[in-house]
Amino acid sequence: MSHSRLLLELSEDRKLLVWKVCNEMNDNAVANKPDRENQKTYFLRLVKGNKELSEIEKRFCRETYIYGFELENARDKRGEPRECDKCQTTRYSDKYCERCISLHLQSLFNTWTSGNEIIDNFIHQCQQLSSLPKSILEWIPFDQFKEIEKLTEGGFSTIYTATWTRGAIVDYDEKKNEFYYLENSLVVLKSLNNSSDLGKSFFKEVIIN
């Protein structure tokens, strides 16, 4: 189960305490161990011996730490490089192979479309270049938004708030070839004026935001 799903298992009155204890253990590990691998081992040992947390809360702390650790390994190429068993490219994380995730995203290209070839090709290229959780550019169908409220309007765009029912990709299960999403997320939407006339200004706006 993804750490984001485990968060839903925590009681509301315990979440702040759990985050506080996790952060304290992480600070302790950083202060006492010089390198990341030893920090990880020390942190997991602190979690195991903690008397304040329940078993589900300990599991959440472990999974959240490993999630960040492995994502950083993959993103910054900080882990030990080795050949991926599936795609035979170099990977740096036990949990994430960016090439494998990119290939999975490519297999889904024919399952969605914005209705505009230029936008589709732009998103395809972005997903091939950056495919780690939290960094994946997607086309989001409008029916995934609810509770849309206008926030403000400017010379070039109108800003709205909304709830994204499916939510962003936050994790990936390599064994299942399955994404996990941050469901019912509060997001900000920007409606660009004259967005039907796509050009360099449109993609500049996308990159900036």
Image: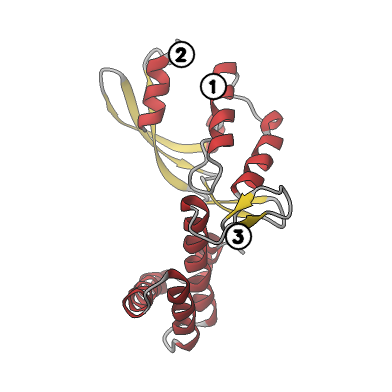
- Element assignment for label 1: helix
Evaluate whether residue 116 shows in this view: no
Where residue 59 sits, quadrant-wise, is bottom right
* Disc 3 to disc 2: CB gap under 8 Å: no
The amino acid on which the numbered mark 1 sits, given as a three-letter code, is Ile
Question: In which quadrant of the rendered image does the N terminus lie?
Answer: bottom right
Q: Residue at x 35, y 72 (%)?
A: 23
Disc 1: which residue? 119
* Disc 2 to disc 1: CB gap under 8 Å: yes
Q: Earlier in the sequence, mark 3 or mark 2?
A: 3
- Element assignment for label 2: loop
Evaluate whether residue 31 shows in this view: yes
Disc 3: which residue? 95
Q: Where residue 61 sits in the image (x, y, percent)? A: 47, 72
Disc 2: which residue? 198
Badge 3, how many Cα within 10 Å: few under 14, some, many 20+?
some
